[in-house]
Image: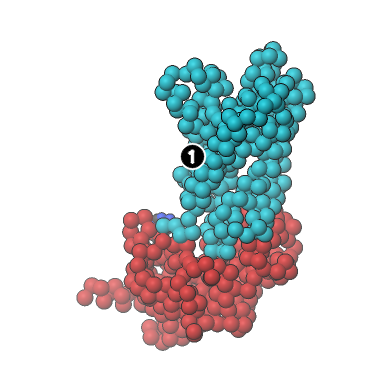
Amino acid sequence: MTHAVVVEELLVNRGGRAVVRDLGFTVPRGTVTGLIGPSGCGKTTLMRSVVGVQVVAGGVVTVLGLPAGSAALRNRIGYSTQSPSVYADLTVTESLRYFAAVLRAPKSDVSRVIDEVGLGRHAGKVIGRLSGGELSRASLAVALLGSPELLVLDEPTVGLDPVLREELWTLFHGLAERGVTLLVSSHVMDEAARCHRLLLMREGQLLADGTPDELRRRTESTDLEQAFLRLVREREEAVRS
Amino acid sequence: MNPAIVLATARRILAQLRHDPRTVVLMVILPSLLLVLLRFVFNSERAFSEAAPALLGVFPFAIMFIVTSVTTLRERLTATLERLMTMPIGKLDLLIGYAIAFGLVAVAQVAVAAAFALGWLGLTISGSVWVLLLIALLDALLGMALGLFASAFARTEFQAVQFMPAFVMPQVLLCGLFMPRGQMADVLHWLSNVLPLSYAVDALTQVTRSNVVDGTLVRNLVIVAACALVALLLGAATLRRRTP
Ligand SMILES: Nc1ncnc2c1ncn2[C@@H]1O[C@H](COP(=O)(O)OP(=O)(O)OP(=O)(O)O)[C@@H](O)[C@H]1O
Ligand SMILES: [Mg+2]
């Protein structure tokens, strides 16, 4: 099994509208795959479908060889939601200790993940009193508990300074080298360049799928932002003609 | 069901409460203060003794309803529920964890209120204090389970708070606290017969007046417990792993 995620003809309706349409792609194991696209294009919806909390209207999502949402997957996936999902009235340590208990992860994991996201100095602080960036790292830390084979991270680096972003991307690549698969969403193009593979999304559909180099070459662009804009224009012309 | 996860959940909720001492003080002390107020409003030990037992059931019911519906709604709104639903936790693990944590708070609440009423305000009961505590605990669990169920229909915390008059007040008005149920108009009497709080208040009244544990008392307790269980299962059905 070389693919961690296989999505075929996915269709998702939200608020009476098809927000993901006829989407298909694969995510190879041990890679960092970036999910890039403008606000509202369906990134979160797609990630929710992969972790199995989204009601889907059609298509097949296979994760680690099993249908998405299978009970057997529940301690093999780490998911970090876009809005921080930790208990604001607990300390960082207390919150992580609870999730570690649910995942039956070893107790030592709590201090490990606190170090990995650089929250060592704030471990005993109540989460509600953390800054925005600290809060999102506290939420990211939960996804790192246990030993997930697949990490689905919805905009994990939003609101972080360049130094912290650099540290987290180093962490992500280190995990991928150990065989963990990462699906990371972002709408920052300079982060896209750090992914092994990119899925470019727009209005619920897949615009392109390939390595950053491939995408640049195909669109004859020097940077990914330009590549993305060219792909959008190409698609619009194709639709018109 | 996984006991370790149930206990971790109960411990987590108690830890959340520990960080919010004002809420804890309000939950544990407020019913007692209201009983004191009531005692002086009635200005007669006999009239107070008539009404107080029922209130010992009504307070934990109403307070647990509101605390649970807000807590659960918060869990839904902050996406911690979404995250938990991707993890190996059963819905009942979560709900029973809630029940244990809030049940413990309810015991503290009722014990303090009962100590005030019995020790200082002149309430006398003929039956066992333990049965009184048991009924109050069942009431608290019933309120908790209904609150959990109601939270599924609220989109905002404002709505959740408004459900308290909608779910709780009719039961309080019809449970026999203000007017004996037998003297109500037929329709109202029938309505009070299908509302679980009525049975809790009947049981509390009986414990006050006599020390016999008879079939009626046991039946009333079973009805309250069964309603709490049904509400808990309904609440579990409203927790969905997949949402639209
Ligand atoms: N709970 C919901 N009910 C109805 N429609 C929704 C809901 N959540 C999202 N949508 C709609 O679905 C579409 C895709 O939303 P989604 O959150 O997946 O976008 P996104 O790519 O993650 O955006 P962003 O980058 O802003 O996070 C949007 O048009 C949004 O309005
Ligand atoms: Mg999103």
* Quarter of the rendering occupied by the C terminus of chain A: bottom left
Left or right: where does residue A236 sit relative to residue B70? left
Query: Which residue lies at the image location 41% right of the left edge and 75% below the top edge?
Result: A7
Give the residue at mark 1: B159
Q: Position of residue A175 (x, y in %)?
A: 61, 79
Pointer 1 local density, CA inside 10 Å: few below 14, some 14–19, many at least 20: some
**Is residue B116 visible in this depiction of the protein?**
yes
Left or right: where does residue A142 sit relative to residue B154? right
For chain B, what colour was chosen? cyan
Query: Which residue lies at the image location 49% right of the left edge and 85% below the top edge?
Result: A2
Q: Position of residue B237 (x, y in %)?
A: 48, 51
Provide the letter of the chain coloured red.
A
Image height of A115 relative to B77, above or below: below
* Residue that sits furthest to the top in the current view: B44
Query: Which residue lies at the image location 50% right of the left edge and 19% below the top edge?
Result: B182
**Is residue A122 visible in this depiction of the protein?**
no
Left or right: where does residue B73 sit relative to residue A209? right
